[in-house]
Image (spheres, rainbow, N blue to C red):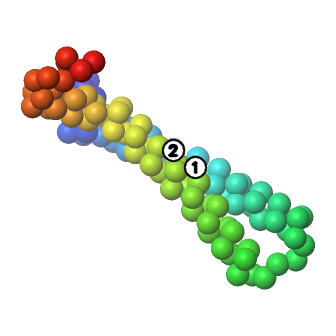
Amino acid sequence: MANDLDDPDYAAFAWARFRWLLKIMAGVSAVAALVALGGIWWWVGTMNWIIAAATLGGVGGSVMLGGALMALVFLSNGSGHDAAVDTFNADRDPGRDARK
């Protein structure tokens, strides 16, 4: 089985793994946002709902974005796309081996 998203079976496996990573990161981002909100509440006390919403969105969104980008890196590497780009670039740049 080739690690290529052109293969329907492997593509289904790779995208299922990507969605699984996103689900895990959604949970991690929710926990991180709630911990941040709890820390601000403990440090400052009661807060306006706008501050609470901004904290939840900012912390949760940042952690989720980082997780989604890392999941895309794993998808790209695991599907063989990174190796294909290296091969393509090696053909276009003859001096590449001399720089290593």
Q: Position of residue 32 (x, y in %)?
A: 70, 54
Specify the amino acid type for callout 1: Met
Task: Please identify the quarter of the rendering in which residue 14 is found.
Answer: top left
Q: Quick check: can you spot residue 43?
A: yes
Q: Position of residue 20 (x, y in %)?
A: 50, 45
Question: Residue, x 67% and y 67% (percent of image)?
Answer: 56
Number of numbered discs = 2
The tag on residue 42 is none
Q: Position of residue 12 (x, y in %)?
A: 33, 42
**Residue under circle 1?**
25
Q: Quick check: can you spot residue 84?
A: no
| Distance in Å between CA atoms under marks 2 and 1 | 6 Å
Do the residues under discs 2 and 1 have CB atoms within 8 angstroms?
yes
Q: Position of residue 13 (x, y in %)?
A: 37, 37
Crowding near the residue tagged with mark 1, few <14, some 14–19, many ≥20 C-alpha atoms within 10 Å: many
Dot 2: element: helix
Task: Please identify the quarter of the rendering in which residue 49 is found.
Answer: bottom right
Dot 1: element: helix
Give the camera-side residue of 30 and 23: 30
Question: Residue, x 51% and y 44% (percent of image)?
Answer: 21
Up-down relation of residue 11 to residue 100 (above or below): below
Q: Report the quarter where the C terminus lies.
A: top left
Crowding near the residue tagged with mark 2, few <14, some 14–19, many ≥20 C-alpha atoms within 10 Å: some
Question: Residue, x 30% and y 40% (percent of image)?
Answer: 11
In the displayed structure image, the side of residue 56 where residue 64 appears, left or right: left
Specify the amino acid type for callout 2: Leu
Up-down relation of residue 39 to residue 67 (above or below): below
Question: Residue, x 28% and y 33% (percent of image)?
Answer: 82
Residue closest to the far front: 99
**Residue under circle 2?**
21
Q: Report the quarter where the N terminus lies.
A: top left
